[in-house]
Image: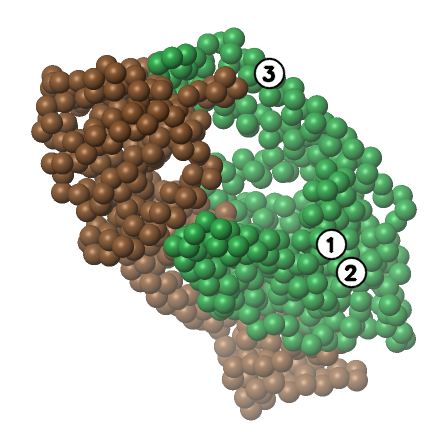
Chain colours: A brown, B green
Amino acid sequence: MQGEYFDGLTSRKHHVEVSVVAGEILGQGPGVSFRWPLKGIRLIEVRDGRVRLAPATGDGRLILQAADWEAASGLSVTRVQRAALRKEGWLVGVLAVVGISLTLGVFVGIPMAARPLARATPLELEASMGRNMSKQLQIAFKPCTGDAYGQDSLDALTSRLARDADMPFRIAVIPVHAPMINAFALPGGTILVTDDLIAGARSPDELAGVLAHEISHIEKRHVMEAVWRSLGVGLVLDTVVGGGSGAGQQAVLLASSFTEQRYSRTLEREADDRAFELLAANGISSAGMADFFERLADKTAPEQVNAAAEWFATHPDSGRRAKAARARAKAGMPALSASEWAAVRQMCPRSPNKPKPPWPLRRKGG
Amino acid sequence: MQDQTETSEGETLAFSETLDVRSFLGLSLKNGLLNLITLTLYRFWGRTEVRRRVWSHVKLNGEAFEYTGKGRELFIGFLIALFTVGLPFLVIVGGAQFLGPMYALLIILPLYLGLPVLVGAAIFLAFRYMASRTVWRGVRFHLRGSPWDYGLANLGYGLLVGLTLGWFQPAASMRLAEKMWGGLSFGSLNLRWVPRASDGIYGPFAIGWIGFVIGYFVFIGAYMGLIMTSGLLPTPAEGGEAPAQPTFVFMLVTYAAFFVFALYMLLVFAPYQAALLRAIIGSLKIGDARFELKLKTLDLLGLTVSNIILVVVSLGFLSPFVQARTARFMIRRLSAVGTAPLADARQARKGPGSGEGLADAFGFSPI
């Protein structure tokens, strides 16, 4: 049979006469000849009725009519292709077992292990992590240096709220200048409250609601739980999935972000629930929490839109939180006296140059 | 660089393709689904299959290219990058969280400065691997040069681009392309980098640069104007009023504005992108043959926009389809003038045993 041959040493094409004799492929042409063992011959490609063959090792290539090749070698092209498919099936099977195990580990195992891990984390380790995070954050968000009486009032309120909680740490509340309405609980018991939040709160009860919520995060060691969870999930996914936009990679990353946020919302609900208990235990009105969430809520969007948007958020939808809070709200004493509240509001003097938040921002942190 | 001087006559170069792009839809679906159930571990084998298919449908002088890479090689490359770069990087950055801010900065800053070097090296290594796995008439391609040299150049040129407010970008792109394409050879037959004086890329770049500056201010102004006048922005905080959460419409308008601006950027830089590609390909010679890419700006813009939409809408599922249509698009516009002694190339030495681990970690792949 006739064939085209490339010897793998130069790029010159040779026309050769090919035969199969005693388990070997023999090729002969002007100035060229070769002899390949039939065993281990590689079928590189089948296209347009032609086969492209290569020896077990080496760079040579032989192109023949598929029918000629099957007749001479007694090897079925279809059978070779089926064998390759079976091999791929095995590969996919093994990869699927590894992949599914990793998926279960990432989406179920790590989140489940995060809480016990958080509880088992030595307090000193968490505290040192918190100190560093606090220092790093305070580079960007400068602590407010205003009224000392305001700080005392804030500390007293925090101590009251924390008195009934099972606190692993001493709480330190630090008001900071930042262009957002937010409060973060850091590892190790530090709570950062932004000046915009203090300015935006209409009553001390609203601020007390936020503080009680953050204290609950600390009591339940939610921060450390989130750290372990995102560390574990992030580490595994970053290393396994890589950063590409190839088929499926983005889908996996999206799924992981939904999972992360679902767990985050669960912790937020837990903290909301506990905050009510802490407020009630101190006889502080919990109506402020409902007021605060109501103002955060996007009332212009239909409920379904907000419910859908919640999927993408770390916090439960404010509208729903407001409803739940309104249902549970109990009347009580104001959290601070008028003079204390006035002093707290003086703590972060708003510089006349400070721009207003350019647009409203969602609360992102704890 | 002296080409082969053996006796054979030169050949003219004619590129053609037989890519049936629709057949890549099935492959896209298969790869996507297998990636999902394997937590994307199948991607190395999937990518290999896409390349094998694309290469085998691209022909030079009637002879198809062959891709000889294996999924296993990419997987090993991934493991190597994971254990030598990825994990140590994560451990160091993670560990630095326990140090004071200044110490953390001292450790993390050099790491981030080193990233452009690493990214450059990753691009070079990926290109070298692909070249070594591309075979035509039984002879491999080969890339000379050093990945670290390329990585350092990437860092240096990047800094220059920053210092010159972007104006060094065209020169940087051409120099990096020279380091890459100028080092390529088909077996023992070297490609040469011989830029044409007629390939001006600074004119089109100026259109993009000025378009960007004007567009930036116009868009910011128009966006803020729209937000302010339409009352979408609830006024925050004169003594005690908490601003509301961003409304749904506000978010929608913001995303739409970003989308329009991104489209505008693609539009103003499209003449430059097309000119750059024409200049890079037009600078390449093999033997006496000079390559040429007949690429029109609007065609490239159409391809880019439709590719982005396809990838985004399909969450990356259609990447193989997009790669096939891009290959077809380019090959149809690729030609060469002059002759080259293609039959005289001698085999290149074997390439690296594994590849592209770093490129995979950074999330880019030439195809």
Q: Which residue is mark 3?
A: B222
Q: x, y (%) of residue A340?
A: 25, 20
- What amino acid does circle 1 point to? Leu
Give residue B342's position: percent from left, percent from top. Answer: 81, 67
Judging from the image, what secondary structure is the residue with disc 2 in? loop
As drawn, B108 above or below A358 = below
Q: Nearer the viewer, mark 2 or mark 1?
A: 1
Which residue is labeled 1 in the image? Answer: B176
Q: Chain of mark 3?
A: B
What amino acid is at disc 2?
Gly
Instruction: Specify few, some or many for label 3: CA neighbours under 10 Å numbering under 14, 14-19, or 20 or more.
Output: few
Q: Residue at x 67, y 24 (%)?
A: B215
Give B356 or B10, whichever is nearer the viewer: B356
Task: Return the residue found at the far front.
Answer: A148
Residue drawn at (13%, 18%) of the image:
A333
Q: Is B176 positioned to the left or the right of A198 in the image?
A: right
Numbered disc 1: secondary structure: helix
Q: Position of residue A60 (x, y in %)?
A: 66, 77
Q: Earlier in the sequence, mark 2 or mark 3?
A: 2
Q: Which residue is mark 2?
A: B182
Of the two numbered discs 1 and 3 on the same chain, state the one appearing first in sequence.
1
